[in-house]
Image (spheres, helix red, strand yellow):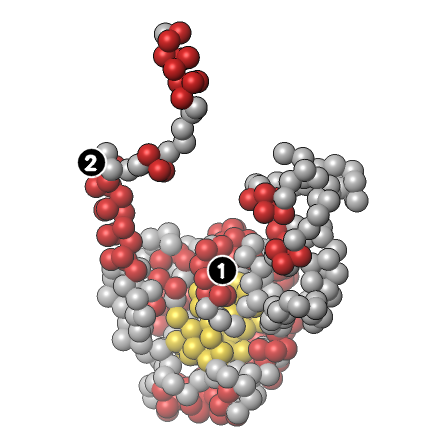
Amino acid sequence: MNRREASPTQILDEPLDDPGGAEEGGLNWPDTLDMGRLLGYGRLYPQFPPTLCGGEKGTQMSGQASSPSPLTIPDLAARKASAGKGAPLVMITAYDIVSARLADRAGADLLLVGDSLGMVVLGRENTLAVTVDEILHHARAVAAARPRAVVVGDMPFLSYHASGSEAVRNAGRLLSKGGCQAVKVEGGRRCLPTIERLLAADIPVMGHLGLTPQSIHRLGGFRVQARGVEGAETLIQDARLLAGVGVFAIVLEGIPAEIAQLVTAAVNVPTIGIGAGPHCDGQVLVWHDLLGLTEELSPKFVRRYADLGSVIVDALARFADDVRSGAFPSPEESYHAPADVVASLRGSG
């Protein structure tokens, strides 16, 4: 189909291949444009000028509702909810374009391409075997949704431990090739030199303290951390050190609520809890856990907001039943040739 002969609706329904042609810098423009639909073209065809897709960032076309501007790292760093600075942050893990679109539409502030994908997507026992290439693969799919939320990529086990240079290269790939806007690094004071190297390379960093899954063997498993005075003091000091070098937020995982409250009060950057009680500046849960897509027993901090696993099984079972009974597809769900064509073909046989 020639794009000049197509309606805007038909253009939107075409496969998103690379527009060809030399006209207007390589894009064949339709003669008439439905501006109401064209506001969505910016995501489908980045070649359209910003002014034609609704103006430069922050502007609004007459008669059109403006879309919220994408969130930024400074936006999030300023969201210290415990100090009355904005609403609590919402972070949800995402691993593909579908989960990214839905989480973004639901209002998430951050999408974490977590190394949890090793367990919930790839079926492994822990996160240790996840590679940079695997995070990169899923980050690209998440970034393809072009979400308003900030996309954060996990730095996998051994991707930042050997040297600062290797850490910068790996994190740089997640930003330059994966579409992430920041990376998350597990660990406290022992990781400070690496985090400083990343920040010096203009790579925003989110910290992660408490139960750090990449350290499960040293910790003796998935166990609550900082229960005693010494452990809690170390955690608070580590959080201060991370905030001091410039991380924009800190995940607190698997620690007592009271300790998380002390940590949150001790730093000037937002804390995001997972199994750390209600006093953090935000919360994060794994996509599969909060939607009821896992069959394994969930930790006590997981609240399931849906039982999609059962819904999906029921839908797939009904599809299988309809196929086996002949109820699917119906005549209304089938394409049909003209009667004279069918008659001609039958007669020639």
Q: Residue at x 27, y 57 (%)?
A: 311
Q: Quadrant of the N terminus?
A: top right
Residue 99 lies in what quarter of the image? bottom left
Q: Can residue 56 be seen?
A: yes
Q: Secondary structure at mark 2?
A: helix
Mark 2 → mark 1, Cα distance in angstroms: 35 Å
Question: In the figure, 193 relative to 139: above or below?
Answer: below
Residue assigned mark 2: 325
Instruction: Give the amino acid type for the residue marked by disc 2 in the picture.
Output: Ser
Mark with earlier residue (2, 1): 1
Residue assigned mark 1: 101
Question: In the figure, 31 relative to 156: above or below?
Answer: above
- Residue 313 vs residue 73, the one in the foreground: 313
Residue 122 spot, x, y in % from top left? 37, 52
**Viewer-nearest of discs 2 and 1:** 2
Residue 320 lies in what quarter of the image? top left
Q: Residue at x 35, y 62 (%)?
A: 288
Q: Residue at x 64, y 40 (%)?
A: 6
Q: Secondary structure at mark 1?
A: helix
Farthest-out residue, front: 340
Residue 19 spot, x, y in % from top left? 68, 41
Residue 326 spot, x, y in % from top left? 23, 34
Farthest-out residue, top: 348
Q: Residue at x 38, y 81 (%)?
A: 276
Q: Can residue 238 be seen?
A: no
Circles 2 and 1, Cβ within 8 Å, touching? The answer is: no
Residue 333 spot, x, y in % from top left? 36, 38
